[in-house]
Image (spheres, rainbow, N blue to C red):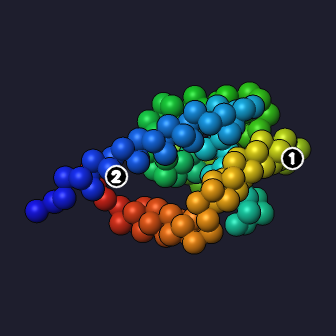
Amino acid sequence: MYDDDIQERMLTAWIGINGFFKDSRMTQDLTYNEAVVMKLVYDQYRADGDGRTPVQSIVKRTNMLKSLVNRTVDSLCAQGYLVKERDGRDARILYIRPVFQRLNDFLAIHQRSLDMVQAVIDAIGPEDAEQFVRICEKFLHAEIQI
């Protein structure tokens, strides 16, 4: 048997935090979706120094529609943040890579997001922030099918 109150509270919290991040204007110079895509490409860049990311992995990780990811990538390419590439071995696979000359522009936008996250950490405390991260990571690794 489930506790209806915890279900309702969790759903309300989920809606609230989602709205907080989408409406916070933490990504003033990029749309929310553009900032998400850039963050994933930047994470790849931090991991390997190159940032070459398959578009399909962005679709999978964000759960955005492929058409929305493609429009978002096209917008970021038009703004000079990303370039598209095809794999020489399998031309069906589309990759994106950061434009290194624009990384500092993205990092300035990204810093505002980090500043907002720091304000949240300051408000809830580092222990609760760590717990929040652990819960989110556990949830993501569980790959719950909805």
Residue at the spot 56% in from the left edge and 36% down from the top edge: 22
Looking at the image, residue 102 sits to the left or right of residue 44; the answer is right
Looking at the image, residue 26 sits to the left or right of residue 62; the answer is right
Residue at the spot 78% in from the left edge and 63% down from the top edge: 49
Is residue 71 in sight in this rendering?
A: yes
Q: Secondary structure at mark 2?
A: helix
Q: Residues within 10 Å of mark 2 (few under 14, many from 20)?
A: few
Q: Position of residue 43 (x, y in %)?
A: 67, 58
Residue at the spot 69% in from the left edge and 37% down from the top edge: 27
- The span from disc 2 to disc 1 (Cα, nearest Å) is 37 Å
Looking at the image, residue 7 sits to the left or right of residue 141; the answer is left
Of 19 and 143, the residue lying toward us: 19
Q: Secondary structure at mark 1?
A: helix
Q: Position of residue 128 (x, y in %)?
A: 54, 67
Of 29 and 94, the residue lying toward us: 29
Rendering quarter of residue 83: top right
Q: Is residue 31 above or below residue 91?
A: above
Of 37 and 80, the residue lying toward us: 37
- Residue for badge 1: 104
- Residue for badge 2: 10
Of 80 and 144, the residue lying toward us: 144
Looking at the rendered structure, the kind of residue marked 1 is: Asn
Residue at the spot 10% in from the left edge and 62% down from the top edge: 1
Q: From this viewpoint, which residue is outermost toward the left?
A: 1
Number of marks in the rendered image: 2
